[in-house]
């Protein structure tokens, strides 16, 4: 049976291989896998703190640490999810409940063409039609705050109810970071919930360069981080951070008579009442163990190395007259194309990927067509 599993696993792309330069790979730390083995073996129920208070406290401690790293104030809260999609859905539900209540028919939210499609997917799940997801024009691949302001005010004048502004801290297609500080100020002025998708870029908050480039993220109402991207952990690991714990709880509260015997554990949250899931495994250990075992400095050094590698790749590519590099990387996504037409670039991309040694993604954006992007 183990041989059958090994054979099946070998039929697929190894996303941790050196030649995998597409999208974002999962590091797959063995220490995190070991943590998951322990958590699944003990199989404790952590949706309600009363049933596993010490384990919930371990998870709570890690999430509180993340809130502090992102500069969120006292009273902020974290939730470990299966990934960015579930974290985004939870954030959107919270924003909708906080700003619209039950009156969602006219609610509008604001994204760009580079916003991850999980936002659009989450909007459909909660009942917002596609026309209420408003696409703001970009300037230099980034959301244009002035254009967003004009759209918000025009929609409000039409009787719509703008409630959510989404900024991106590391777009999947371009690697770029929206002007988070300006967008946070716009959201505050217009009374919108400000959400930042930092699924890819959030891990770089541990570095000095990352903090500088993510300036303004501390003013977000909610932040999504995927440790399986820029913190090298296993797939299925996501984090939602929310500025106001009460807003998260109010959007997901509930209960039944069968919960009457549960005791409140002071200082700990019942995770089952902070998101859609009422049953969840103990996810905190896959974060807690690697951070404590290896130390935060090991993660910081690895992330700094990735920033250095991206800068080195950018410098070498820009010095080569064969290539065009349309923009300097904000983080670790380097977009590049051959000088020539799109057909020539697609042909090169096909030849590279056909080798089976290197995997590069398709063109990064409609705005600046590229041969591929290295991560």
Image (cartoon, grey):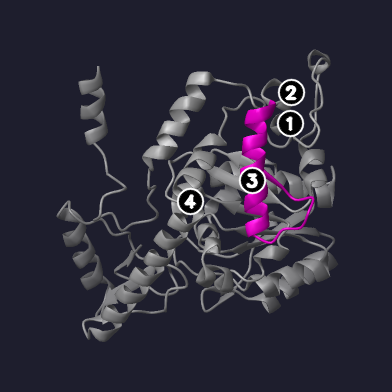
Q: Tell me: 217 left or right of 94.
A: left
Whichever of labels 1 and 3 marks the residue nearer the N terminus, that label is 3
Which comes sooner in the sequence, label 2 or label 3? 2
Q: Residue at x 48, y 38 (%)?
A: 236
Mark number for residue 63?
A: 3
Given contact means CB atoms under 8 Å apart, are the residues at marks 1 and 4 in contact? no
* Closer mark to the observer between disc 1 and disc 4: 4
- What secondary structure is marked by label 4? loop
Q: Which residue is label 1 attached to?
A: 270
Residue 88 at x, y percent in the picture? 62, 48
- Tell me the number on the disc at residue 295: 4
Q: What element carries label 3?
A: helix
Image spot of residue 135 (x, y percent): 62, 64
Given residues 34 and 120, the one toward you in this image is 34
Disc 1 vs disc 3: Cβ atoms closer than 8 Å?
no
Q: Which of disc 1 and disc 2 is earlier in sequence?
A: 2
> What range is drawn magenta here?
53-78
- Quick check: marks 2 and 1 in contact, CB under 8 Å? yes
Q: Distance between the residues labelled 1 and 3?
A: 14 Å
Q: Is residue 97 left or right of residue 183?
A: right
Q: Position of residue 54 (x, y in %)?
A: 66, 29
Asked whether residue 91 appears in the rendered view, the answer is yes
């Amino acid at each position: 049976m183990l041989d059958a599993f090994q054979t099946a696993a070998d039929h697929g792309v190894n996303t941790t291989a050196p030649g995998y330069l597409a999208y974002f790979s999962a590091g797959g730390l063995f220490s995190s896998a070991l943590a998951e083995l322990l958590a699944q073996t003990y199989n404790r129920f952590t949706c309600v703190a009363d049933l596993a208070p010490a384990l919930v406290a371990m998870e709570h401690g890690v999430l509180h640490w993340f809130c502090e790293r992102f500069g969120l104030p006292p009273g902020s809260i974290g939730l470990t999810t299966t990934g960015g999609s579930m974290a985004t859905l939870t954030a959107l539900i919270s924003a909708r409940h906080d700003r619209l209540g039950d009156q969602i028919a006219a609610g509008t939210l604001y994204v760009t063409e580079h916003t991850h499609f999980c936002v659009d997917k989450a909007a459909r799940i909660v009942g917002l039609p596609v026309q209420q997801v408003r696409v703001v024009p970009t300037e230099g691949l980034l959301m244009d705050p002035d254009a967003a302001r004009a759209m918000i005010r025009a929609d409000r004048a039409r009787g719509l109810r703008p409630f959510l502004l989404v900024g991106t801290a590391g777009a999947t297609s371009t690697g770029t970071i929206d002007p988070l500080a300006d967008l946070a100020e716009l959201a505050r002025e217009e009374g919108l919930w400000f959400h930042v998708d930092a699924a890819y870029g959030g891990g770089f908050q541990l570095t000095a360069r990352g903090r500088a480039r993510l300036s303004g993220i501390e003013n977000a109402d909610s932040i999504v981080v995927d440790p399986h991207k820029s913190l090298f952990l296993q797939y299925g690991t996501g984090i939602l951070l929310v500025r106001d714990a009460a807003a998260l709880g109010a959007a997901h509260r509930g209960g039944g008579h069968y919960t009457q015997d549960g005791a409140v554990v002071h200082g700990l949250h019942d995770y089952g009442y902070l998101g859609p899931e009422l049953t969840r495994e103990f996810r905190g250990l896959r974060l807690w163990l690697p951070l404590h075992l290896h130390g935060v400095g090991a993660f910081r050094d690895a992330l700094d190395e990735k920033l250095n590698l991206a800068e080195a790749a950018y410098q070498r590519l820009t010095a080569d007259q064969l290539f065009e590099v349309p923009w300097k990387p904000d983080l670790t996504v380097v977009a590049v194309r051959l000088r020539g037409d799109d057909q020539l670039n697609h042909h090169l991309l096909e030849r590279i990927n056909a080798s089976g040694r290197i995997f590069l993604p398709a063109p990064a954006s409609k705005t600046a067509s590229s041969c591929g992007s290295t991560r």
